[in-house]
Amino acid sequence: YIESEMYGVKKMIRDSFREFLEVLFQAAALVIDTIRTFFLIVLSILGPLAFAISVWDGFQSTLTQWLTRYISVYLWLPVSDLFSAMLSKIQSLILQKDIDSLSDPNFIPDSSSTVYIIFMIIGIIGYFTIPTVTGWIIQAGGAGNFVRNINQTTTKTGNIVGAVTGSVAGNIGGRLMK
């Protein structure tokens, strides 16, 4: 009788934990979607202001930064959908394994298995990494060091070409004047 009660308590705790993780899993997806919507609304309101400010000297990068942030936040939904599709495939594989295991007469299906609980924890953590992943796709702080290095190299190359051109023109002009 005591062993039966202990098993019942253990199963009740495991089921409660599973239900708690399922709620957290659904809440994580909802939180990401809600924050995305809020950010897009704010960025949409501030878009014309960013365009207006970018006209002045020293604020040229404002429009570029606004655009990269808008695209980065906009990509949260496609990345979230991709992550959800991956999770659905993994979940269907878990269910297929359980269905295949039903042919064993000793197998008892249990919706609160350890694999399912770990799967839910991975899903919860994964949903909160979506902003980081979209930051990898398009850098929200602008184009980053790569474009800065290209601009510096282009400027240096332009300076060298200008110096060489000026030197050659000055040398030829000087010889013609003699």
Image (cartoon, rainbow, N blue to C red):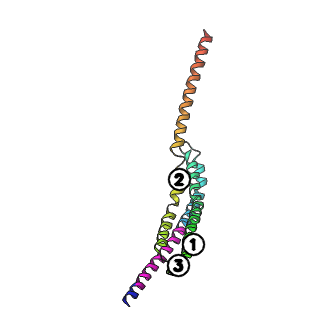
Residue 175, given in percent of the width and then of the height, sits at 60, 11
Q: Which residue lies furthest to the bottom in this view?
A: 1
User: In terms of depth relative to the viewer, which is nearer, 58 or 3?
Assistant: 3
Magenta span: helix, strand or loop, mainly?
helix
Label 3 CA crowd tier, 10 Å (few <14, some 14–19, many 20+):
few
User: Looking at the rendering, in which quadrant would you find the C terminus?
Assistant: top right
Residue 87, given in percent of the width and then of the height, sits at 55, 66
Q: What residue type is labelled 1?
A: Gln
Q: Which amino acid does label 2 sit on?
A: Trp
Task: Return the mark for residue 104.
Answer: 3
User: In terms of depth relative to the viewer, which is nearer, 168 or 133?
Assistant: 133
Disc 1 target residue: 96
Q: Residue furthest top?
A: 178
Q: Nearer the viewer, mark 2 or mark 3?
A: 3
**Label 1 SS:** helix
Residue 172 location, quadrant: top right
Q: Residue at horizontal 54%, vertical 48%?
A: 142
**Label 2 SS:** helix
Tell me which segment is drawn in magenta.
7-30
Disc 2 target residue: 136
Q: Which of marks 1 and 3 is in front?
A: 3
- The earlier-in-sequence mark between 2 and 1 is 1
Q: Residue at horizontal 49%, vertical 81%?
A: 106
